[in-house]
Amino acid sequence: MTQLLETDLDPDPFVQFERWFDAARAAGIVMPEAMTLATSGMEGEVAARVVLLKSFDHRGFVFFTNYNSRKAKQIHDNPRAALVFWWQSLERQVRIEGAVVRTTEEESDAYFATRPRGSQLGAWASEQSRVLAGRGALDARFEELSTTYKDVPIPRPPHWGGYRVIPLLFEFWQGRADRLHDRFWYRLRSDVKDWVVERLSP
């Protein structure tokens, strides 16, 4: 049975995450970048959905979406979020909590340019999270845009771009027998601007 000991952990949670993320990819896990994103609004309502991690570094964890979506409205009202990665075959989970900011326009432009053409058109066609009269309306809008942008580059919609979750807390969870799992969290201490690592009871 795999175990996680204090001596296994890197003092830098971003390095520790990269180790586990690389291990998930090496293990052949399908879409290891899939993560649950939880947000909440001003009235305390909470929503969660799965999005894809597109990049990460010491500045934070980046995903892209429609800025008019429900998740974006909640982030605007309450710019904090939680992320969860679950890699079942490895019995590993990573939780991240932190603040949320938009990526720069340049970062959003650069990523949008790498998307498949159909996904670029889809970003224009979909008014994400809004009530849709029927599938036909969406398909017609997609075809209209296909004609409009035929044989020309597709610009990034102004309502579409990235967010960066800036971690204040990480938790690394390793499954163990008898529900006696190994759990460690990294808490960012603002007074010393460093990470404190502690073992948690399962």
Image (tube, grey):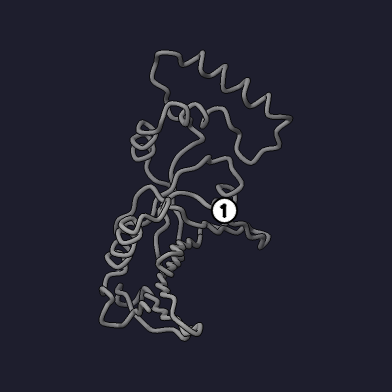
Residue 107 higher or lower than 6, as above or below: above
Residue nearest the observer in this picture, 93 or 132: 93
Q: Position of residue 143 (x, y in %)?
A: 57, 18
- Kind of element beneath mark 1: strand
Residue nearest the observer in this picture, 198 or 117: 117
Question: Residue at image x 46%, y 63%?
Answer: 86
Q: Position of residue 176 (x, y in %)?
A: 43, 80
Figure quadrant of residue 140 = top right
Question: Residue at image x 74%, y 30%?
Answer: 133
- Horizontal placement of 77 versus 175: left or right? right
- State the count of labels: 1
Give the crowd class for mark 1: few <14, some 14-19, many >=20 residues within 10 Å: few
Residue 13 higher or lower than 24, as above or below: below
Question: Residue at image x 42%, y 25%?
Answer: 155
Residue beneath label 1, please?
49
- Horizontal placement of 15 versus 91: left or right? left
Question: Residue at image x 46%, y 53%?
Answer: 34
- Horizontal placement of 201 versus 153: left or right? right
Q: Position of residue 119 (x, y in %)?
A: 47, 31
Q: What is the quadrant of the N terminus in the image?
A: bottom left
Q: What's under tag 1, amino acid-wise?
A: Arg
Residue sticking out furthest to the right = 133
Residue nearest the observer in this picture, 74 or 93: 93
Q: Position of residue 25 (x, y in %)?
A: 33, 55
Residue nearest the observer in this picture, 11 or 106: 11
